[in-house]
Amino acid sequence: NINSINYRKLDVTMRMFGMVQTVQEITRIAKLGDRITQSTIDIVMTNTYSNFIGCKVLDDRIGDHQAVKLTLDFNIAKASKFKKILIRDHCKSNVSALKQFLSQNSDYQPILNSSNANEAADGLNSHIQHPYSALIPLL
């Protein structure tokens, strides 16, 4: 009943939270004694009215209630495609070959003598990169 105190309390509470009731049609038709009653007892409340597209009471019934169809527009970010990653063969024999190559064919003294950590890291990376690519192949 739109004039009842409970309806007014609900209305005030919904307004406080920026909510609206979207169902505007009769959702329940029931027989009460000799008379037939009609009411909007099934409701949908939302505070995201900008996502609301429509609400429709369907002819389908669930007991003495009619089904309600609500349509919302949600912008859901599309999942990105899987990124292809390269996998190298780190088997024991390949790692051993890399270890042997780096121990026999490398002069680490310039890297060890560096006083700049970033330069040392860059030097070590460039020192290892080519043998690593050659001796640890892609699968």
Image (cartoon, rainbow, N blue to C red):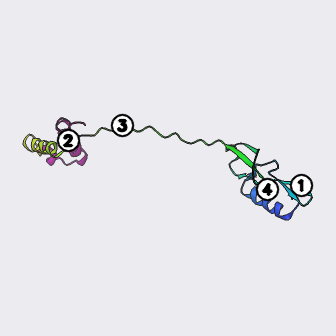
Front disc: 3 or 2? 3
Counting the numbered discs, the total is 4
- Whether the residues at callouts 4 and 3 have beta carbons within 8 Å, the answer is no
Front position in the image: 90 or 108? 90
Front position in the image: 60 or 108? 60
Question: Which quadrant would the N terminus be assigned to in this image?
Answer: bottom right
**Residue designated by label 4:** 41
Q: Which amino acid type is shown beneath numbered disc 3? A: Lys
Front position in the image: 117 or 51? 51
| Chain-order first, disc 3 or disc 2 | 3
Q: Which amino acid type is shown beneath numbered disc 1? A: Ile
The tag on residue 102 is none
The tag on residue 123 is 2
Which quadrant of the view contains residue 64?
Answer: bottom right
* Residue 77, x across and y down, in percent: 54, 41
Which quadrant of the view contains residue 126?
Answer: top left
* Residue 3, x across and y down, in percent: 89, 60
Query: Label 2 crowding class (10 Å Cα cut-off): few <14, some 14-19, many 20+?
Result: some
* Residue 34, x across and y down, in percent: 92, 58
Q: Secondary structure at mark 3?
A: loop
Q: Which amino acid type is shown beneath numbered disc 4? A: Ile
x 20%, y 38%: residue: 129
Query: Label 3 crowding class (10 Å Cα cut-off): few <14, some 14-19, many 20+?
Result: few
x 80%, y 63%: residue: 9
Q: Residue at the far bottom: name it.
A: 5
**Left/right of residue 84 with respect to residue 94 in the rendered view:** right
**Residue designated by label 3:** 84
Query: Label 4 crowding class (10 Å Cα cut-off): few <14, some 14-19, many 20+?
Result: some
